Structure formats: structure tokens, C-alpha cells
Amino acid sequence: MLLVFRVTAVVHTLAFFMQPVLAGMFLSGQDSAIAMHRANATIVTTICLALTVLAFLAWRRQLIRRRLLAMLAAILLLEYVEMSLGGSHILLVHIPLGVGLFATVVATLPMVMKAAPVAPQLSLTRERAFAEETVS
């Protein structure tokens, strides 16, 4: 489960990395690059959706912390916003949001790679019962 989660995160990061490359190709005069940029945005967002679903499943099995799931869900939401802004040609927000998202995706990758099963927390009542047993 964690292996698939990690591989998906790496693929997502690599696909996301292609976005500024394709945008740069378009700005350099390769008009076909804008269509590839648009298609890759759909691919990136779809991979992020799969990554978020995997994160949810891993969280339910206590393989990752809730914070990582929340971060990936926020990235997914922002990627949809980013795609909408780009499709609407609102570049004033699209470009800085893309830069911020790229930094966030790259910063999240080590957290995904370090993800380890979450230790179950004993309830306070169970801890007291255990303490009383050991004292008696």
C-alpha cells in the first residue's frame, strides 16, 4: 500500500515538473506546447486525485498521519483552481499559484517518502488501567 502511494507521489511530482517546462516551450514560440500544457494539467490533477484517494485509504489503515492527508487534499483542490484559472487565462493568479503549488508538491514528497504506520494511541482510561495493573 505504502509503495503504491509513494510511487504515485513521485509520478505526480514528475508530471507536475513538466508544467513549467511546457509553459516555457510555449513562451519560446512552440505554439503546440500550450495544448500539451493543458493536457498535462489534466493528467497532473488526475494523478493527484488518485494520490489523495490512496492517502485516504492509507490514513484509514493508520499508515499515514491525518496532516499528510489534509495537505494532499488541499493540493488537489488548489490544482483544480489552478487548472480553472489557466483555462480562463487569468495568468495574474495562475502563474504565482503554479509556482507555489510546485514548491508545495516538492516539499510534500519527503513527507510521503518518510510516512510510517501511526502508533495506536491508548485512551487515558486504558493507560490508567494498565498503570493500576502494574502497581498491584
Image: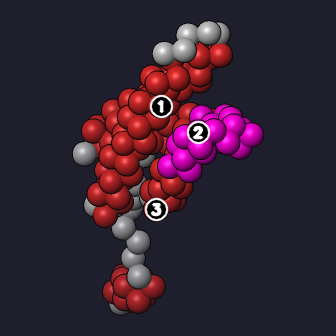
Q: What amino acid is found at the position of numbered circle 1 in the picture?
A: Arg
Number of residues whose C-alpha sits closer than 10 Å to that of mark 2, classed few (under 14), some (14–19) or many (20 or more) = some
Mark 2 to mark 3: distance in Å? Answer: 30 Å
Number of residues whose C-alpha sits closer than 10 Å to that of mark 1, classed few (under 14), some (14–19) or many (20 or more) = some
Which residue shows up at 39% across the image and 76% down it?
122
In the picture of the structure, the residue carrying the numbered disc 1 is 38
- Please report the bounds of the magenta region as a residue range: 80-102
Q: Residue furthest left?
A: 1
Q: Nearer the viewer, residue 40 or 10?
A: 40
- In terms of image quadrants, where is residue 131? bottom left
Location of the N terminus by quadrant is top left
- Of callouts 3 and 1, which one flags the residue occurring earlier in the amino acid sequence? 1
**Residue 49 picture location, percent across and down:** 37, 48
Residue 86 disc label: 2
In the picture of the structure, the residue carrying the numbered disc 3 is 66
Mark 1 to mark 2: distance in Å? Answer: 8 Å
Location of the C terminus by quadrant is bottom left
